[in-house]
Amino acid sequence: MKQYLILFLISLTFFSCSSDNDELIKEVSAKIKFSQNWDSTTIEKSDLSNTKFTNKLGTKLTIEKLRYLVSKITLTNGSNEATVFDGYKLIDLSDSESLIHNSTLKISEGTYNLSMTFGFNNDDNYKVGGYQDLNSASWNVPDMLGGGYHYMQMEGKFLNKIIEQQGFAYHAIRAVDKTDPASLKFEDTFFTVDLGVISIKNNATIEIKMNVAEWFKNPNEWDLNELNSMLMPNFEAQKLMSANGKSGVFSLGPVTQ
Amino acid sequence: MNCSSKDAEDIYVPIPASLKIPILFQQKLIAPVIPTNNTLTEEGITLGKRLFFDKILSKDNTQSCATCHDPKKAFTDNDRFSDGVDGKLGTRNSMPLFNLAWNFDERFTWDGKELSLERQALEPVRNLIEMHSKWVNVAQKIKEHPEYPTLFKEAFGSVKIDSTLITKALAQFERTLISGNSKFDRHLLGTTQLSPEEQNGFDVFMDETRGDCFHCHGSNNNPLWTDNKFHNNGLDAILTDLGLGKVTGDPNDNGKFKTPSIRNLKFTAPYMHDGRFNTLDEVIDHYSTGLKSSPTIDPLMKKVKQGGVNISNKDKADLKAFLLSLSDNDFVNSFN
């Protein structure tokens, strides 16, 4: 009798019943793997400072640092019920551990729509007390630009018009117009990315891909000779970055399970 | 005394200790790094402190760690290069020591060669230019000391005195060196106000179109005032000291050195990894007009073509005032 009871309890642990038809539904876990590419060519840590890329305008560049933040990774089922992965994720290409987002969250097997936010929405960006791990990673935005946190830091060097190596710092934050420092004007530059539909049957690893080339491409062909540094206080540049980010930078990769 | 058995001579359980973490650090930062194989104890810290100031670690008993890491100077000295027991000079400026437990990557020294505080402590004793000793000799001297064997037994429950235990004790003490009570800290806590000059200096520091220092040196939200990363900050056009590059073997790391904290600059001159700048004015002038380009120069040294950020004399003076507001007098005066 005791053995039957244990079996029953184990089955409760692994299965739950849907309310509609009493079918057994498996609980599974999912983790997110972040990958980066340049128009389908994978970018690894070893490419930092080494591999020369060519952007849409034909400018040759290398990337030395690539860090970006995503939040509100969400799986939404057919009943429009959303499961939000805990927290947020600061991805650093130079730190392989940061490329995987593990979660203790359990979800039911099924079909979901996957979405996420690039950067923080305003509530999260200005959370009272902030985030100790992001402060420790020097991820803050100065108060004179409204505070909060960076969304992305991409740094490297490019060959400029006169064929000289020059640095660039493509830093994305919430766009701020500080024409009047006493009255900052903002425009939201975080955005939600709809990554599409996935079917989860077992414990799964979901890949989210960033095509870095797209930051320089569409709809705004990015001219590093014109926009290369001091972009944080550049209201228009921030809006251009956001527009490019919305247009094909992120996509869904393979789901292994 | 904290005994776990009837026989206090045989088993002594050291008393667990914790760091006195400043409020701002508690609010802003993640927890400090304390290795699980070298947790802090009262006895370990006391032993480490005694060893730190004891010349027994050097070949001829003439130098201690404190010789080059003087508490009154925020645990550095004021020499460009420090001389060792044989009078030979090193090639790097002695680094100040504080807030080391918040070095999350645990890469220590200017070139990141040492991958933990415990491992770092191994080096000066055996370095030919520094203490020029041998660990086996140091351990023997300590074993024969009238007091140290008891102190080791109390700290580690073992009488096997060797380099591992000695460096563990030193690292425990070094982790207690915490500096977080400067005027600027008190300003952030609301108990004092900055002068207009200091406030403008802070604004210069944080302004991407002026100083833009915060990307590497932290901010009011990162009270370490360093990213603990490695950068080429445009000191030389031709790189002779390769820094991190010599350690990693990666030419992309050539000329990169650890970002030092800007706390306690009042006490830590001269500046840079090779102590080339005697004054803060020289340091600020470097970033304003003295940058030199090289293949690995950091992209954040963005105005290198113009020599630097070209800030006004007023902004330079105010920036210096702000930097000096990060001086922690209590810290340098708390060791006798």
Image (cartoon, rainbow, N blue to C red):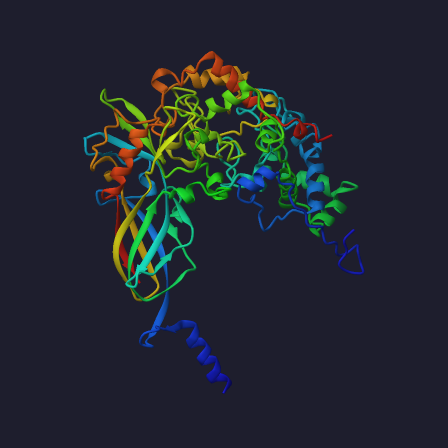
Q: Is residue B24 left or right of residue A209?
A: right
Which corner quadrant of the image does residue B95 belong to? top right
Q: Position of residue A183 (x, y in %)?
A: 41, 28
From the image, which quarter does the C terminus of chain B lie in? top right
Residue at 30 percent across and 24 percent down: it is A166
Farthest-out residue, bottom: A1
Tag count: 0
Farthest-out residue, top: B313
In this orientation, which residue lies closer to the viewer: B213 or B163? B213
Q: Position of residue B175 (x, y in %)?
A: 62, 40
Q: Position of residue B18 (x, y in %)?
A: 65, 46
In this orientation, which residue lies closer to the viewer: A174 or A163? A174
Residue at 44 percent across and 36 percent down: it is A140
Residue at 40 percent across and 19 percent down: it is B309
Q: Is residue B245 left or right of residue A223?
A: right
In the rendered image, the vertical position of residue B6 relative to residue B38, given as above or below: below
Q: Is residue B146 left or right of residue A147?
A: right
Which corner quadrant of the image does residue A45 belong to? top left
In this orientation, which residue lies closer to the viewer: A224 or A156? A224
Q: Position of residue A237 (x, y in %)?
A: 29, 30
Is residue B276 in view from this perspective? no
In this orientation, which residue lies closer to the viewer: B125 or A163? A163
Is residue B203 in view from this perspective? yes
Residue at 32 percent across and 38 percent down: it is A189
